[in-house]
């Protein structure tokens, strides 16, 4: 596995962890509301939904970390979880904000390509 693939995959995992923090713990704070463009009342009303969404990002990060930990044997696991992140990013871009395509899907797609080429 190439260093580039490892770094890109780790970056995607760290991004997923950051999304977990934003959605589970910072959703109703000024930082969270500013990041997602939310009114205070709406942020409060959707707090539980955001926490659930953040938890799923944590699962993606855990899967990517698992794949990295396994090294060469984790190739399929890394591709699977990177693919999940790409799909989530494309869906988010289509339904919520186009920005998600560049913040979530593109880094995961680049990590997928690097992982595939490193094999």
Image: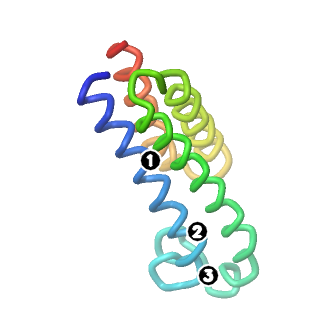
C-alpha distance separating marks 1 and 3: 29 Å
Relative vertical location of residue 64 with respect to residue 49 in this rendering, above or below: above
Q: Which residue is identified by label 1?
A: 13
Measuring from the top left, give residue 63's x and y in whole percent. 55, 42
Do the numbered discs 2 and 3 sit on residues whose CB atoms are within 8 Å?
A: no
Q: Residues within 10 Å of mark 1 (few under 14, many from 20)?
A: many
Relative vertical location of residue 15 with respect to residue 69 in this rendering, above or below: below
Nearer-N-terminus badge (1/3): 1
Instruction: From the viewer's perspective, tell me whether residue 23 is left or right of residue 74.
Output: right
Label drawn at residue 39? 3
Give me the residue at 44% from left, 32% from top: 70
Label drawn at residue 72? none
Q: Quadrant of residue 83?
A: top right
Nearer-N-terminus badge (2/1): 1
Of the pair 68 and 48, the residue shown nearer to us: 68
Give me the residue at 74% from left, 68% from top: 49
Give me the residue at 41% from left, 16% from top: 116
Of the pair 81 and 44, the residue shown nearer to us: 81
Observer-side mark, 1 or 3, equals: 1
Question: Under tag 3, what secondary structure?
Answer: loop
Q: Quadrant of residue 106?
A: top left
Q: Which residue is identified by label 2?
A: 23
Measuring from the top left, give residue 86's x and y in whole percent. 55, 34
Nearer-N-terminus badge (2/3): 2
């Amino acid at each position: 596995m190439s260093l580039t693939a490892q770094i890109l995959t780790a970056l995607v995992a760290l991004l997923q962890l950051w999304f977990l923090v934003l959605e589970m713990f910072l959703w109703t704070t000024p930082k969270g509301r500013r990041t997602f463009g939310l009114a205070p009342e709406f942020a409060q009303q959707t707090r539980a939904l955001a926490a659930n969404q953040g938890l799923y990002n944590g699962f993606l990060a855990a899967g990517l970390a698992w794949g990295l930990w396994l090294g060469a044997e984790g190739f399929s696991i890394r591709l699977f979880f990177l693919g999940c992140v790409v799909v989530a990013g494309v869906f988010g871009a289509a339904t919520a904000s186009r920005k998600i395509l560049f913040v979530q899907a593109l880094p995961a797609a680049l990590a997928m390509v690097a992982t595939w080429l490193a094999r």
